Amino acid sequence: MQIQECKPGREGNMEENLSIGSKPRRRILIATDGSETANEAADFGIEMVGCSGAKIYALYVIDTTPYRSVPLDQIWSKETLDEFERVGHEATSYIERIGAAAGAEVESRVLKGNPAEKILDFAEDNNIDMIIVGSLGKSGYERVLIGSVSEKIIRHAKVPVLVVRERHKSEKKLIQE
């Protein structure tokens, strides 16, 4: 995806036509798991808010949900934890790159815990104005069995949530051709 860089003074720029000096700077959270769907959500989110002057937070959560009662250092080796953190930083660096290309300020974080809870807590603790997440569009038994992070966020968030669904395989094929 090609992100258009924001340039002051472009004709048709909303900031020129609106007096936004008195409004506080918006804070947008883009949660990622590093998947193609999460990257599509990040692309869409940056395209939507990149030129608005909003600060963007890129967040990756290492899912420790199955191990709540046992300390991570007793389950995973330091190398395993380091690998999870590397994957998290790689996922958030994608958002940093596309944000920078659009002229947006992006701050990245990698946290550990239940993904939905950590995303919601981060949003509340940092006065986030909107959360952007990707969704694989799982339904029925699969969603009930493994749960849906995006669904939990939608149900419990105190701010608007933008969920970007995975493109259908036929759409992806047409885009790549």
Image: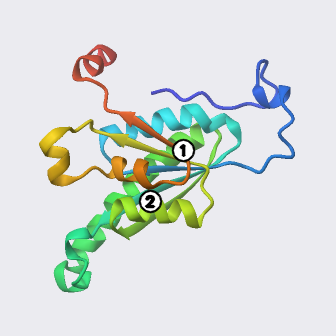
Residue that appears at 86% across and 46% down: 22
- Percent across and percent down for residue 103 are 65, 40
User: The N terminus is located in which quarter?
Assistant: top left
Residue that appears at 67% across and 35% down: 51
Residue that appears at 83% across and 30% down: 18
Residue assigned mark 1: 160
- Percent across and percent down for residue 124 are 56, 63
Left or right: residue 14 compared with residue 71 = right
Residue 153 appears anywhere in the view: yes
Colouring mode (rainbow / by chain / secondary structure / one colour): rainbow
Three-letter amino acid code at the position of disc 2 = Ile
Residue assigned mark 2: 119
Three-letter amino acid code at the position of disc 1 = Pro
Rendered image: mark on residue 139: none
Q: How many marks do you count on the picture?
A: 2
Asked whether 144 or 79 is in front, the reply is 144
